[in-house]
Image (cartoon, helix red, strand yellow):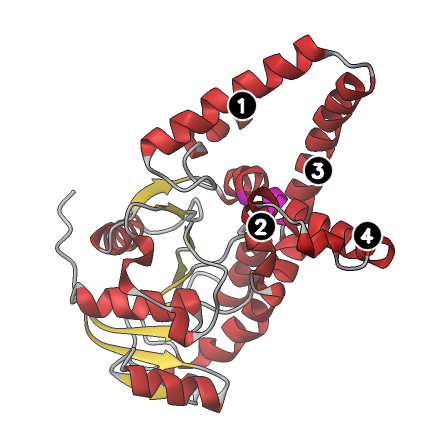
Amino acid sequence: MKNNIKFENIAIIGLGLIGSSLALALKKHKIAKSTTGYAKSAKTRQIAKKLKLVSKVESSLEKTVKSADLVIICTPLSTYKTLIGSIRPYLKVGAIISDVGSAKSKVMADAEKILGNDFDFIPAHPIAGTEQSGPEAGFSELFINRWCIVTPYAHSKKKNIILIKKLWQKIGSSVEVMTPEHHDRVLAITSHLPHLIAYNIVNTAADLETVTKSDVIKYSASGFRDFTRIASSDPTMWRDIFINNKEAVLEMIGRFSEDLSVLQKAVRWGDAAALFKLFSGTRKIRKKIIAAGQDIDTADFGRVKKKLK
């Protein structure tokens, strides 16, 4: 598939880490003749102008979307329903709406009720990010060698799906198309559950502080620090992910809990053979991830996807 692509104007709603990185990537690869960015916060708009993230920064949703061929929503999932309803009256005829959200089924159901058949909503999810947030955290290389999952409706226009795929390929991502339901199950185990565990283990450590005072922090090894790095991610974003993808997350918590019980039993009974077998198997998988040169949240994506079918 050739990646020749050019939009007249792309509107980016939300200029945090993903929005600002996307704006810089679009500029770098000259995918749009112009870009318009929207941020609710005056401070964010000021920073966006200073960093020249987009061609124009707006404080009005109407002015942001009225001339856009493509509108990409880069705000927390909890804002989608109100936001889509707010921009609908001002959308250009034939405009495509997309997003970068980490959960799909619920927001797509809401969007379909609001947009009907008048506009094509082609959701996308770049599996990329850092624990940093805000417009100053963005960089154009964020999406290189990362997966981007596109989750169209069954009735989505093929030409629009192709345009969204080409856009993400142009800025360096490998693109996969799947149903929103399947996306939510795959991401629940590869991304959402690891974040939930990281948040919880930090909370457990904080509770232990009441007994050991500074000892937990003082003696925290590199393993604890590395594992809990993602617990410093944006709390609003992750709150919304768990609320919007609760069914799939709860399913994966159940599976994880069952496996953890088996491990707990092996530790309790001193089952050295079972522990060694488990650790050897997971070590081999981890080596394959490192060899592939991909992030741990995305490298085993294909294997997990196949397993969940």
Identity, as a three-letter code, of the amino acid under mark 3: Ile
Q: Which residue is mark 3?
A: 253
Residue at the spot 38% in from the left edge and 76% down from the top edge: 91
Which callout, 2 or 3, points to the residue nearer the camera? 2
Q: Which residue is mark 1?
A: 282
Predominant secondary structure, magenta span? helix
Residue 103 x/y as whole percent: 55, 52
Foreground: 259 or 245?
259
Residue at the spot 74% in from the left edge and 26% down from the top edge: 258
Q: Residue furthest right?
A: 211
Label 3 CA crowd tier, 10 Å (few <14, some 14–19, many 20+): some
Residue 208 in sight: yes
Identity, as a three-letter code, of the amino acid under mark 2: Arg
Foreground: 162 or 143?
143
Q: Which span is picked out in magenta?
A: 191-195
Going from the N terminus, do you reach mark 4 or mark 1 first? 4
User: Is 156 placed above or below 134 here?
Assistant: above
Magenta highlight on residue 257 = no
Q: CA distance from mark 4 to mark 3?
A: 23 Å
Q: Which residue is mark 2?
A: 225
